[in-house]
Image (cartoon, rainbow, N blue to C red):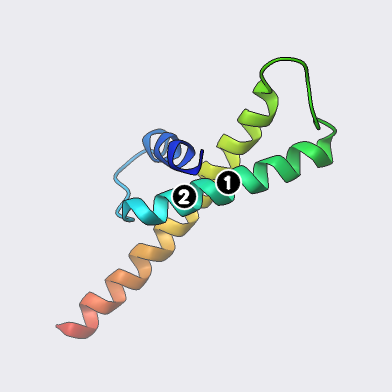
Amino acid sequence: MGFVLGLIAKAIIPGKQHSPLWLTTICGMLGAIVGNAVARAVGVASTRGIDWSRHIFQLVAAIIIVAAVDALYMATLGKRKQQRA
């Protein structure tokens, strides 16, 4: 689930993301966990059939996490490249 959420989040975010696939997968897993927690807090614990609302919470959390982690990744990577030069 984390892999799929991470890839969808990466596809939705405009521009190019530079984080590697393993980091995107971890961010997708964190998005699933955070999205489930937010869904429970809002009162969407379980529904009949497919839990579309919970999936939306998971996707939004994954988008936020992937964007934040990619920005941190690029800030760290950019600093390393400047130090080498």
Snapshot quadrant of residue 73: bottom left
The mark lying in front, picked from 2 and 1, is: 1
Residue drawn at x 75%, y 36% is 39
Mark 1 belongs to which amino acid? Gly
Location of residue 57 in the rendering, given as x and y in whole percent from the top left corner: 65, 35
Residue 60 visible, this orientation: yes
Residue drawn at x 80%, y 39% is 40
Q: In the visual, does 53 lie left or right of 81?
A: right
Is the Cβ of the residue at disc 2 closer than 8 Å to that at disc 1? Answer: yes
Mark 2 belongs to which amino acid? Val
Label 2, label 1: how far apart the Cα atoms are:
8 Å
Q: Nearer the viewer, residue 72 or 46?
A: 46
Quarter of the image containing the C terminus?
bottom left
Residue identified by numbered label 2: 66
Q: Which mark is residue 31?
A: 1
**In the structure shown, which secondary structural element does the residue marked by tag 2 occupy?**
helix
Looking at marks 2 and 1 on the same chain, the residue that comes earlier in the sequence is marked by 1
Count neighbours of disc 2 (C-alpha within 10 A) and say few if under 14, some if 14 to 19, many if 20 or more.
many
Q: In the visual, does 46 lie left or right of 73?
A: right
